[in-house]
């Protein structure tokens, strides 16, 4: 099972360069800004995706890929409807993979900071409202689980309620688990914000 997952994850990251269409950020209408900050050890490659169908996690669109020396540029999402983001990381030797998916409802004219944290055994993501860089706020988000035998997400109705906690997954790609509250360490995140 782990070998199959790693092969799937490697194929997904390979698609970063080839088959997965790029995400095109909206330029008109009500939008929200996305900023990405990754804590990535050497030897790990990752991609961040949005979905054309955020309810079922169908039709992934590549926002960007990176590693310990390459960061993602900021982007934006349409405000109002559901948005689903996925972090997929693979050890460059291809032995372990980690995937975490969350959904949230972006508000117009807000800036959201997606913080990813990766180590040898697990990965996690936190989403905070960074519109006021001096007053970061956790964002209610829905951790999404992948349906068995599929890359699609289980229905949003199966998530009982949104959480302001970080979503985590073990390094073998198992389902996300709740971890530490995203309010913990928010002061540390202020240094990650751009100065512009």
Image (cartoon, rainbow, N blue to C red):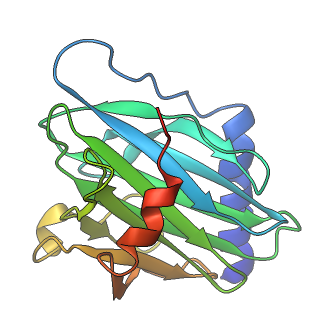
- 24 above or below 43? above
Determine whether 146 is above or below 180 in the image: above
Q: Is residue 86 left or right of residue 117?
A: left
The residue at 39%/70% (across/down) is 187
**143 sits to left or right of 51:** left
Residue 150 visible in image: no
Question: Looking at this rendering, what residue extends furthest in the top direction?
Answer: 28
**Which is more toward the observer, 189 or 61?**
189
Closer to us: 191 or 3: 191
Which quadrant would residue 5 be assigned to in this image?
bottom right
In the rendered image, residue 190, in percent from the top left (x then y), is placed at 43, 59
| 104 or 73: nearer the viewer | 73
- The location of residue 99, given as percent across then percent down, is 54, 67
**Left or right: 101 with respect to 49?**
left
Quadrant position of the N terminus in the picture: bottom right
Residue 113, relative to residue 29: is it above or below? below
Let me know if residue 65 appears in the view.
yes
Residue at x-position 57% and y-position 34%: 73
Q: Quadrant of residue 82?
A: top left
Look at 52% across and 36% down and name the residue there.
Answer: 63
In the depicted structure, whether residue 135 falls above or below residue 159: above
Q: Quadrant of residue 80?
A: top left
């Amino acid at each position: 099972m782990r070998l199959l997952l790693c092969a799937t994850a490697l194929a997904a990251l390979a698609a970063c360069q080839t088959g997965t269409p790029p995400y095109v950020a909206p330029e008109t209408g009500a939008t929200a800004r996305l900023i990405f900050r990754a804590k990535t050890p050497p030897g790990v490659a990752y991609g961040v995706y949005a979905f054309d169908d955020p309810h079922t996690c169908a039709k992934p669109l590549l926002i960007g890929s990176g590693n310990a020396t390459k960061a993602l540029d900021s982007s934006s999402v349409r405000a109002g409807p559901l948005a689903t983001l996925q972090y997929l990381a693979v050890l460059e030797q291809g032995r372990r993979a980690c995937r975490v998916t969350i959904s949230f409802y972006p508000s117009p004219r807000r800036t959201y900071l997606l913080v990813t944290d990766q180590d040898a055994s697990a990965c996690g993501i936190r989403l905070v409202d960074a519109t006021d860089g001096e007053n970061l706020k956790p964002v209610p988000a829905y951790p999404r689980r992948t349906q068995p035998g599929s890359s699609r997400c289980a229905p949003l109705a199966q998530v009982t309620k949104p959480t302001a906690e970080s979503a985590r997954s073990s390094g073998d790609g198992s389902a996300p688990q709740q971890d530490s509250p995203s309010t913990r360490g928010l002061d540390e995140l202020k240094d990650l914000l751009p100065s512009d």
